[in-house]
């Protein structure tokens, strides 16, 4: 079967690049067996700490054991100080917890390192929108310019435009976002709310 063949190939790769092979093993196993995937990612991390690997390990730990994920962030910071991926993980975690002040501050730090990161621009725009901060409009526009076919980004920009009184343009963007992601309950909800106005 394909999984066995992939794992056999990974065993050969271990002889050339042990860390890369462990990371690839984690990628392959992550869909079916999170425990084995975590073991593989941890083995890769012990061989070579990289930002992409740290993100994978953190996401998987967050799904399986949030306490371990939090502890791993400390190790991540020691191994890769100033890593933009760590800033993104910190900002996203703070945003999920409703800690807008921390999320905004961290996204702003990240934006200084990655000014063209559409996701960071979008998330910061949304937070500014929720805080009634006029900077939301410009950041949402920049995010949409960078990623014009991303439904989540278009949704944010549309909502900010509507709040700014640009209802026609906002509605058009919401409709485009829904075409790109027809099963998105959030976008559907935003359109319904707009129709009820």
Image (cartoon, grey):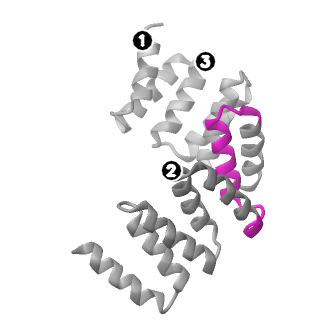
Q: Determine the residue located farthest toward the left in the rendered image.
A: 1
Residue sitting at x 61%, y 81% = 47
- Residue corresponding to mark 3: 163
Judging from the image, what secondary structure is the residue with disc 1 in?
Answer: helix
Q: Where in the figure is residue 3, as x and y percent of width and height?
A: 29, 73
Q: What x and y, as percent, mark residue 151? A: 45, 38
Q: Secondary structure at mark 2?
A: helix
Q: What residue is pinned by disc 1?
A: 195
> Residue drawn at (43%, 8%), measured in percent from left and top?
196
Disc number placed over residue 63 in the picture, else none: 2
Q: Is residue 100 magenta?
A: yes
Q: Quadrant of the N terminus?
A: bottom left
Q: Main secondary structure of the magenta part?
A: helix
Q: Is residue 171 above or below residue 26?
A: above
Quarter of image, res 174: top left
Q: Residue at x 60, y 25 (%)?
A: 160
Residue 79 in which image quadrant:
bottom right
Pointers 3 and 1 in contact (CB under 8 A)? Answer: no
Left or right side of 108 for 186: left
Q: Residue furthest top?
A: 197
Q: Earlier in the sequence, mark 2 or mark 3?
A: 2
Q: Is residue 24 visible?
A: yes
Quarter residue 9 falls in? bottom left
- Locate residue 81 relative to residue 32 in the image: left or right: right
Magenta span of residues = 78-101
């Amino acid at each position: 079967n394909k999984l066995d063949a992939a794992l056999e190939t990974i065993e050969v790769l271990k002889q050339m690049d042990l860390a890369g092979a462990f990371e690839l093993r984690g990628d392959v196993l992550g869909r079916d067996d999170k425990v084995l995937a975590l073991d593989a990612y941890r083995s890769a991390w012990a061989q070579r700490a990289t930002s992409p690997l740290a993100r994978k390990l953190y996401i998987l730990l967050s799904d399986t054991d949030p306490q371990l994920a939090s502890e791993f962030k400390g190790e991540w910071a020691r191994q890769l100080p100033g890593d933009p991926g760590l800033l993104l993980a910190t900002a996203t975690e703070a945003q999920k917890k409703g800690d807008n002040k921390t999320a905004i501050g961290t996204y702003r730090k990240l934006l200084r390192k990655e000014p063209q990161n559409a996701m960071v621009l979008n998330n910061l725009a949304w937070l500014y929108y929720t805080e009634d901060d006029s900077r939301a409009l410009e950041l949402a526009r920049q995010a949409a310019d960078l990623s014009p076919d991303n439904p989540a980004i278009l949704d944010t920009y549309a909502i900010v435009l509507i709040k700014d009184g640009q209802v026609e343009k906002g509605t058009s963007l919401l409709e485009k976002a829904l075409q790109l992601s027809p099963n998105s309950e959030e976008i559907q909800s935003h359109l319904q709310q707009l129709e009820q106005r």
